[in-house]
Amino acid sequence: MLGLLLSRLATAIPSIIGVVVVTFMLTRLLPGDPAAYFAGLAASPQAITEVRAKLGLDKSLPEQFVGYIGDLLQGNLGNSLSTGQPVVAEIATRLPASAELTLFALIVAVAIAIPLGVLAAVKQGTWIDHLCRIVTTAGVSLPVFFTGLLFAYVFYYLLQWAPAPTGRLDVFLSPPTHITGFYLIDSALTGNMETFWGALRQLALPAISMAIFSLAPLARMTRGSMLAVLGSDFIRTARASGLAPRTVVFTYAFRNAVLPVITTLGMVFSFLLGANVLVETVFAWPGIGLYAVNALITSDYAPVQGFVLTMAVLYVALNLAIDLLYGLVDPRVRLDA
Amino acid sequence: MKRRSFFKAGAAAGAAVTTAPAIWSEAKAQARNETLLIVGESPPNSMDIHGVGANRPAYEVSWNTHDRLMTYGVKKDANGNDHYDYTKLEPELATEWDLKPNSVTFKLRKDAKFHDGTPITAKDVKWSFDRAVTVGGFPTFQMKAGSLEKPEQFVVVDDNTFRVDFLRSDKLTMPDIGVPVPVVMNSELCKKHATAADPWAMEWTKNNHASGGAYKVERWQPGQEVVYVRNDDWKNGPLPKIRRVIMRIIPSAGNRRALLERGDADLSFDLPSKDFAELRSSPKLTVIGTPIENAMMYLGMNVNQKPFDNVKVRQAVAWAIPYQQIMDAVMFGQAIPLFGGADNKFKGVYWPQKDGYKTDIAKAKALMAEAGYGNGVETTISFDLGLASTNEPLTILIQESLAQIGIKATINKIPGANWRGELLKKNMPMITNAFGGWLNYPEYFFFWCYHGQNAVFNTMGYKNPAMDALIDKARFTSGPEYEAAVKGFIDMAFEEVPRVPIYQPLLNVAMQKNVTGYRYWFHRQLDYRQLAKG
């Protein structure tokens, strides 16, 4: 098992090196001059030259690259110019914000999508199947930023049920003591229930808007995969042997149908984590997507490189975790094959 | 469980559920009354105005948390709102000063202290001024605008007396000491965090304060919020009325408006013109729009390229711009027109002012024919995509109008990050852009935008020795001679039109009705010290 883990990790190394080189080159090839941008409004050419030297941008590309790699090996991703903070620290505070939102949205989506998909497959052609179809079609056709804006307008502006979309916490609450960076977990661990409820209330709308979007592929995949399994010979045999319908559906059919659902889950998760910029913008969520986009707009190299690198590492870890999960769910899957 | 105890438990649980939120909201209401919540679009990137690339929100942090030697007085503007008065310098850290032809001597307040309790002395002032003229970049540049260039100019006479020696007689020297850059920092505290490579502790001050101003930063979450508390020991002005200020970043403009309209936020600058125009009629909010001094939106033409090297073509363009349409459809009336004056001449010693151009396509066509471009010409018109909400519709309107006089302009959208770099190259044939100067003097604007020194903001690459002579004369003279010089360069700018003034933008702010004391400042950031809520 350990050997397997290591060999899988080893195969990931070339792709990570590739990501490092490509992001370095790409950010330098982008149009835009950070020195001119950060020299300020009333900058003279010599002021811009000074800023350029200060940022190390007057050196040749290979020199800059060697410097970058050296820093990287020491765990230093550089400083963001637009927020003035070390990129590592920023990602460390922003990644949990995105992860908390994404995981929460995914849990909501799974809790709805899987039962819905299973029921739709078992009771094919009934109202619940139609409901599943409607929900999934609506889910994929409503972009997240649209549902997000709509929810903020209806539930905050008109009805006042939801709190103001001001980020992870109400303005007058202090963030909980930092343990995991997940506000819900941290506030629960420290017994700070006011913050817990505050964080949960803030989380509800963005998480639901994202859940609606991610629900669709999950429910459809569950339904399709369940239908295929339910039509296969071993289910017919199980039914003919007089097993209870519950046992047939859950013990035999569902366990066999869940594999593609896990694959989809992994894809949806990684997609959401990087692509929830729009939800983060609508709800002022201080997440990693918003951070990366702001950095791109200002030609702020270091955060863009840090973001891409973090995402690459995250994808590698996620794929590995999903592969391992396959083995646990279905003993027929041979990982080393 | 017995039936009765079940009911009891149920009732108790019910009571707990109904009372818990009530206690919470009461505490919240209390905090709410003492706090000013500002919602904005872009976060500060530093706590130090001298830092590399410190942005405008960082100026606001610096302005409210630091002292300067002098500040500006206040007057009422045409609408009866408070407006800083650039003609009146008033005491802040300095209680009085003695202005001589070759120097100025400041007496410092004796009981003023930094946030850590250290008394503020003249050596702190010198250290801070030395820092501003030494570290390079924007602070050094801004100091230079007032002929403050060398550490030798700053002299510690004794603990409470500080002298600035002048390099030359420059009327911008005194006003420049009141701008956000020359802040007074706690030199001993900074020196503790200085290193050989970083003698001015620039790294440390990026995230920390060595200041003594009216507010202290209680919490800073980069990219998210800044929380301030009042410094109750502040001596350098009347104690501010608001105890806490929270500046929260809300990236979506729609939500900033929603927060204001629902009464959840107190104040915001960052809304689109259309929203400000609509909110003006809202009974719940106060909207104040102040013309931004010494600023204009303009169309610039590159005078070193064909066809704009021909003054007739430039005048034709000035006659072809759809001014009124821009005012109505792009700005929703939220700007001051700079066109359609009685004539194309100087109207007084102030800037910006109306020129004589208005939309007259026939006249423009005639000028094009005279210039020899009767058959039309092709060019491009560029704008900064970072400010697309205004620039894009404005540029499209101009493009349509120019097509009528035979100028076929392709629109070139340039990403915000790239804009400064492109301006520096000075090879864009035509641009729409805005510029504003801090110090409210016509010659200050002209020095940046029309002078042959060719600063970044002379985006037209305009060089005219006669113009330069007039600008230089205005900088160092006064009285009738000064007025004649200003008249000279304004007339010349209108006649030659390398840039066509379109409108003077407004600085708009929307706030709750119970927020009072808002004051317009030349730096266009919010001064928390004069605000009150109640």
Image (cartoon, rainbow, N blue to C red):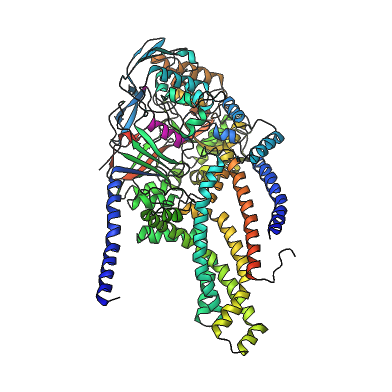
In this view, which residue lies farthest toward the right? A337
Residue B161 is situated, as x and y percent measured from the top left of the image, at 36, 14
Q: Quadrant of the N terminus of chain A?
A: bottom right
- Say if the magenta span includes residue B58: yes
> Residue A295: which quarter of the image?
top right
Image: B383 above or below A6: above
Residue B517 is situated, as x and y percent measured from the top left of the image, at 29, 37
Image: A330 above or below A268: below
Residue B317 is situated, as x and y percent measured from the top left of the image, at 54, 37
Q: Please state the total of marks drawn on the protein image.
A: 0
Q: Is residue B478 visible?
A: yes
Does residue B173 appear left or right of residue A83 in this picture?
A: left
Front one among B219 and B401:
B219
Q: Quadrant of the C terminus of chain A?
A: bottom right
Residue B13 is situated, as x and y percent measured from the top left of the image, at 29, 66
Q: Main secondary structure of the magenta part?
A: helix
Please report the bounds of the magenta region as a residue range: B56-69
Image: A39 above or below A194: above
Front one among A94 and B92:
A94
Front one among A41 and B195:
B195
What's the residue at 64%, 41% (across, down)?
A: A72
Q: Is residue A224 visible?
A: no
Image: B42 above or below B262: above
- Say if the magenta span includes residue A324: no
> Residue A299: which quarter of the image?
top right
